[in-house]
Image (cartoon, rainbow, N blue to C red):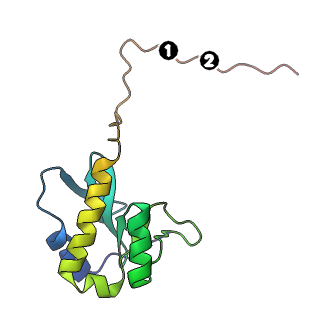
Amino acid sequence: MAWRKSPQPLIDLFGRVLPDDARIERRQMFGFPAAFVNGNLFAGLFEDSFMLRLAEADRDDLRAAHQAAPFEPMPGRPMREYMLIPGPVLADQPALKRWIDRSLAYAVALPAKKTKSRARKTEGAPAPRPAKRRRR
């Protein structure tokens, strides 16, 4: 499935509104700008959408105040805890920064993700077992 690149103005906005906080790691996720804290994604772009990870009460507030929708990278497959940020909030940078602060606070309270080793250690590891032959 080919995804559309995020528009440059949205990428620029994302870069401007993220807090200047040493705990935040900015990196790409599926080719889109994303922000992580303690290994947990809390903000990111996907195509022409801006999404935030929010606590349940904050998701309810965002829905009630701005008719926000859950983030669904694929139709019918919403990502738990993630909401799309509606256009009026994106246009109001102070409001957007408040929502980002809520998202960051929620992500900081989550357990840190364990880092995964990309290279498998082979030194001292047992040799792989040969496949068993099936009897007929």
Name the spot of residue 112 as percent of width and height, x first: 32, 41
Which residue is under mark 2?
Answer: 130
Q: Amino acid at mark 1?
A: Ala
Name the spot of residue 116 as percent of width and height, x first: 36, 36
Q: Is residue 85 left or right of residue 101?
A: right
Name the spot of residue 28 as percent of width and height, x first: 28, 59
Residue 127 is tagged as: 1
Question: Of 19 and 136, which appears nearest the observer?
Answer: 19
Label 1 environment density (alpha carbons within 10 Å; few <14, some 14–19, many ≥20): few
Q: Amino acid at mark 2?
A: Pro
Q: Is residue 125 above or below residue 110?
A: above
Q: Is residue 26 left or right of residue 60?
A: left
Question: Of 89 and 74, which appears nearest the observer?
Answer: 89
Say which residue appears at 33% left-offset and 50% top-offset: 40
Q: Secondary structure at mark 1?
A: loop
Say which residue appears at 24% left-offset and 86% top-offset: 91
| Residue 3 shows in the view | no
Label 2 environment density (alpha carbons within 10 Å; few <14, some 14–19, many ≥20): few
Rendered image quadrant of residue 89 = bottom left
Say which residue appears at 24% left-offset and 76% top-offset: 96
Q: Secondary structure at mark 2?
A: loop
Question: Of 113 and 128, which appears nearest the observer?
Answer: 113
Say which residue appears at 39% left-offset and 60% top-offset: 55
| Residue 123 shows in the view | yes
Of all residues, the one furthest to the right in this rendering is 136
- Mark 2 and mark 1: span between their CA atoms? 9 Å
